[in-house]
């Protein structure tokens, strides 16, 4: 074979090799299946119209404003898993201002707040944990702990033509230990005890979690932070959340971004799931 023939053959093989490599990379990129979960955090009566209504918090947010947005997501996007969480506290929960006298003997010596001068929303230092004092809320088996009546719950009553009719649903109660609070859907506040959520999601091969609900700067924040720690691709749907304090919301969302969470608008979720949305446009 002459020189030109050898050169042509060499170019031919190199081109085939390059095209094959590109094809394999493309196949690898698209063959990795994403399994998407919508995680709806604490859309409960007490956070909307009850004892810990966001209207009475510094933000003055209307917690019910998240409901139409969440319902629209449920009605228009096929998720692989849907999760509903609820605060589910015993009547003597450590976070309740009304229960401070039950634990006055456990208040740390160095605490600036004690049972005699404690007020709502104070931070009080117990022997093992610092705790903010919330009004009693989301007590087990009370109306305040129920999910809001207007929130769409995917269950056996869901119409057969609903896009998420057959989607697996996880219902999770958190904050059930009277002696430790649990903002996150994954762990208690001291990361002593883990909930079953991670194991349930892993069994369903979930890779991506989209988080909505109440409150942005408390339970949504903690849940998203832990989801990212557990290596889920984590998105917080900003306009499907409401929070306690505007300054804290800004701070917590920034912190989530620094921990590899994406802050996204609800009208971008479908495109992101379908792979047609540019990451730079998430917030627009």
Image: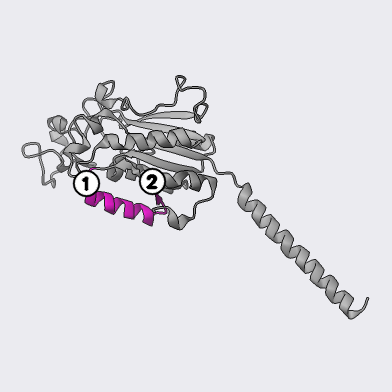
Q: How many other residues sit within 10 Å of disc 2, few (<14), some (14-19) or many (≥20)?
A: many
Residue at point 29%, 40% (across, down): 215
Q: What element carries label 2?
A: strand
Residue 69 visible, this orientation: yes
Residue at point 35%, 35% (across, down): 68
Quarter of image, res 8? bottom right
Q: Which mark is residue 193?
A: none
Which comes sooner in the sequence, label 1 or label 2? Answer: 2
Locate residue 195, reporting x and y percent. Answer: 40, 34
What's the CA distance linking mark 1 and mark 2? 17 Å
Residue 195 visible, this orientation: no
Locate residue 84, reporting x and y percent. Answer: 39, 31
Verify whether residue 252 appears in magenta: yes
Location of the C terminus (image quadrant):
bottom left
Locate residue 251, reporting x and y percent. Answer: 27, 53
The one nearer the camera, 109 or 47, is: 47
Q: What stretch is highlighted in magenta?
A: 244-265
């Amino acid at each position: 074979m002459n020189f030109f023939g050898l050169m042509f053959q060499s170019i031919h093989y190199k081109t085939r090799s390059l095209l094959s490599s590109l094809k394999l990379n493309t196949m690898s990129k698209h063959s990795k299946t994403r399994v998407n979960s919508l995680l709806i955090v604490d859309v409960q009566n007490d956070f909307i119209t009850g004892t810990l209504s966001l209207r009475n918090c510094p933000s003055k947010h209307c917690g019910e404003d998240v409901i139409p947005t969440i319902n629209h997501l449920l009605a228009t996007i096929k998720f692989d898993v849907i999760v509903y969480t609820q605060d589910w506290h015993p009547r003597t929960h450590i976070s309740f201002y009304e229960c401070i006298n039950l634990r006055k003997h456990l208040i740390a010596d160095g605490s600036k707040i004690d049972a005699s001068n404690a007020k709502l929303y104070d931070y009080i230092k117990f022997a093992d944990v610092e705790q903010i004092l919330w009004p009693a809320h989301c007590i087990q088996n009370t109306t305040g702990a129920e999910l809001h009546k207007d929130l769409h719950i995917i269950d056996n009553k869901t119409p057969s033509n609903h896009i998420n009719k057959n989607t697996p649903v996880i219902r999770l109660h958190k904050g059930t230990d009277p002696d430790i609070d649990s903002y996150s859907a994954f762990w208690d506040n001291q990361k002593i005890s883990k909930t079953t959520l991670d194991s349930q999601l892993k069994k369903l091969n979930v890779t991506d979690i989209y988080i909505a609900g109440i409150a942005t700067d408390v339970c949504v924040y903690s849940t998203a932070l832990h989801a990212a720690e557990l290596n889920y691709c984590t998105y917080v749907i900003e306009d499907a959340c409401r929070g306690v304090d505007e300054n804290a919301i800004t701070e917590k969302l920034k912190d989530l971004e620094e921990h590899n969470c994406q802050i996204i608008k609800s009208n971008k979720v479908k495109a992101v799931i379908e792979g047609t949305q540019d990451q730079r446009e998430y917030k627009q």
